Amino acid sequence: DIRFLPSYSGATPTCDAAKRTLAISAVVDFGGDPAEVGAEVTPESVVCIIEAMKVMNEIKAEVRGVITQNVDGLHQAAGSRRVVELHGSLGRVRCLDCDERLTRDRFQDRLQARNAAWVATLPRRVGAGRVEWAPDGDAELPDTGLDGFRVPACPACDGMLKPDVVLFGESVPRATVDEAWRLFEEADALLVVGSSLAVYSGRRFTCRAEKE
C-alpha cells in the first residue's frame, strides 16, 4: 500500500503499485542569494529528502542505496553510505591522461598557491563590482581577467586536469553504469525523487523497471 503524497509543487506523484515504482517531483525554493545556497543550505533542509523519507516509511522499505545525477555530494553529507554518482562529483578532480584523482580541496590549495599574485591583482584589473557570480558559483570574467592565470598540471604525470564530472556530450563511465545496475538488481522497488528524468543516464533505470 502506497499513499499518494503531494509534491512540493502540489503535483500528484505517479505510482504503479504492480511494478512497485513511485515518482515524486520536488521543487525547492532556497530563498536569499542563490550564490550562497551551497554554503547555507543543509541536506536536512532539502524538501525532496523529507518527501522521500515519508514514502519509504509508508511502504516499510529498506534503502539499499542511492543512484544520483547530482554532483554536489549532498547525499553523502546527509548520511547516505552507498551512493552511485552517475555524473561524478565536483569534490574531485581527474587527470585526462593517467586518470589520477585528487580532492577538489587539494587542487584548490595548489590553484591558489600558483596564482597568489593573480588573485591579489584581479579586482584592480577587472574593476570593482564587475564580477557577477552565478547561482552555481561560476563567475564570468572579461578576457583581460584571465591574463596570467595558471592551471596546475597533474601531480602524477603532468597531464591536464578537469572536474571529475560528466559534462554535456560525454558518456557516463562504464564502471559507474555497471555499479548502478548492480544496485538496481538488488532492489525490489525503485523510488524516483526530485528528477524530471529528462536525461537518459537516469531515465534508463525507470525504463527497465517499467518493463520488468
Image: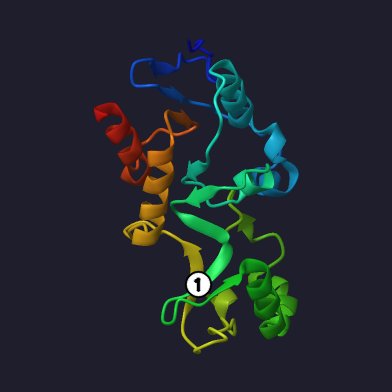
**Residue 73 or 131: which is nearer the viewer?**
73
Kindly indicate the quadrant of the structure image that contains residue 184: top left
Kindly indicate the quadrant of the structure image that contains residue 147: bottom right
Helix, strand or loop for disc 1: strand
Compared to residue 199, the image places residue 117 above or below, namely below
Asked if one can make out residue 141 in the rendered structure from this viewpoint, the answer is: no
Residue 137 place in picture, x, y as percent: 61, 55
The amino acid at mark 1 is: Arg
Compared to residue 7, the image places residue 146 above or below, namely below
Residue at 61% from the left image edge and 26% from the top image edge: 53
Residue 197 place in picture, x, y as percent: 37, 35
Residue at 73% from the left image edge and 49% from the top image edge: 39
Kindly indicate the quadrant of the structure image that contains residue 40: top right
Which residue corresponds to mark 1? 94
Asked if one can make out residue 158 in the rendered structure from this viewpoint, the answer is: yes
Compared to residue 126, the image places residue 34 above or below, namely above
Residue at 51% from the left image edge and 74% from the top image edge: 143
Residue extending farthest left: 211
